[in-house]
Image: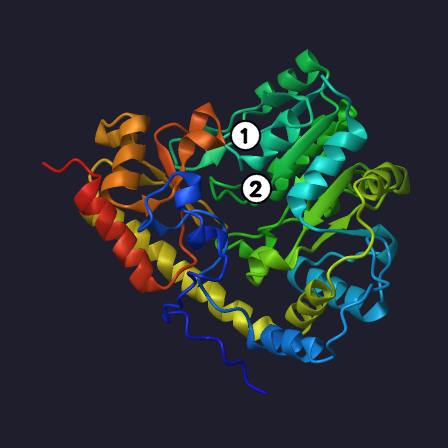
Amino acid sequence: MPERNLNFDEVIERRHTDSLKYDFAVRRGMPADVLPLWVADMDLKTSSYVEDAVIERTKHAIFGYTETGADINNDAYFDAVAGWMKRHHDWDVDPRWLVKTPGVVFALAMAVKAFTKEGDPVLIQQPVYYPFSEVIEDNKRVIVSNDLYLGDDNRYHIDFEDFEKKIVDNNIKLFLLCNPHNPSSRVFTKEELERLGDICLKHDVLVVADEIHNDFALYGEHTVFAKVKEEFADHCIVCTSVSKTFNLASMLISNIFIPNATIRRPFKKQVDAAGISQLSALGLTATQAAYEHGEEWYEHVISYIKENIAFVKKYAEENLPGVKVIDGEGTYLMWLDFRGTGLSPEEIDRRIIHEAKLWLDSGRIFGKTGEGFQRINVAVPRATLTECMDRIRYHVVVKD
């Protein structure tokens, strides 16, 4: 059966579907008619194989408890996940390593609770996905940031000396790594990851690697942190999910790999304490179908996103004076630097929201280093993206 859902230019009406992206603007303090390109889900239909598998499963019409809890893996499901990881990331995974959770952010919170106590510092790299800060602060831990810096090559880089200094000065024992990095779009090289990992091993720092965007290494190669060195696998947690790759965020399922049983046990204990036992039958069905049959759809969506990224870069160069698109290698999220416009971060936000009627992610929520930036989700039909860029051009940018 051929893949049906490949027309990514189709604009699909998402309003009145309880979409967080579209239906909750007013509740979030936005104008009712705002155009949203903020939260990281796609305005693109998922694979028709996923669609068909979910429909077929619902025909059974009984949705009782499934024996597929956090650490129980049926062979077909695990084989689908393991096959994808092997084909796309050259990583051989063991079924004993896998703990399933309702999401990666949930897994980050479980790690914070399992491996630190209230008042402890946790290391991150800002500007970074804002739930990193939330799971630290909401659990009464302290944020320590090894800020990434913007280099002359228009890409973000790691200050390794500061990284080690922050670990030593703050007695860090837990580091939340985001790779591919959100929002900077960096895909850290194997050499960068090795240097980070060596420092963490030296100081006995556990690494929790959020690799949810691992399938969107668009220009470069994603390296699973656990396979950089054998010793790293024994001292890390790797968080993955089908949710970004196949646009399945509401299915509430992520695959967390923890090779070291000594680390896996306290993590799993926190998952149990949170009351998670069985997971969504439809989420399991969708994940298995995506990883077994979604290759064609995935290849097409990668091509489409690359074209959208190229479109934004060209548009900004030709039409948005003072706005610089930061270069990266991955994700479908783009990081736009508005500091050259001369506008304050507050004025940028005001114009984007109330004049352009756009809902983007203000850089300020990614940490102080994000001030003056905006994050935009380009996994949308080209017409939607064009409308967004036109609104920035005519309602935000200071023109000569």
Q: Name the kind of residue labelled 1 in the image.
A: Ile
- Give the position of the C terminus as an image quadrant: top left
Q: CA distance from mark 2 to mark 1?
A: 9 Å
Please state the horizontal and vertical placement of residue 296, each as a whole percent of the image. 55, 74
Q: What colour scheme does the image use?
A: rainbow
Residue 65 appears left or right of 305? right
Q: Nearer the viewer, residue 400 or 189?
A: 400
**The residue positioned farthest toward the left in the image shown:** 400
The residue wearing badge 1 is 158
Q: Residue at x 29, y 29 (%)?
A: 339
**The residue positioned farthest toward the top in the image shown:** 169
The residue carrying pointer 2 sits among few (fewer than 14), some (14 to 19) or many (20 or more) residues within 10 Å by Cα, namely: many
Q: Is the residue 262 above or below the residue 16 in the image?
A: above
Q: Kindly state the secondary structure of the residue where label 1 is placed.
A: loop
Q: Name the kind of residue labelled 2 in the image.
A: Phe
- In which quadrant of the rendered view does residue 134 lie? top right
Residue 45 appears left or right of 308? right
Marks 2 & 1, CB-CB < 8 Å contact: yes
Q: Residue at x 55, y 61 (%)?
A: 247
Mark 2 or 1 closer to N-term?
1
The residue wearing badge 2 is 188
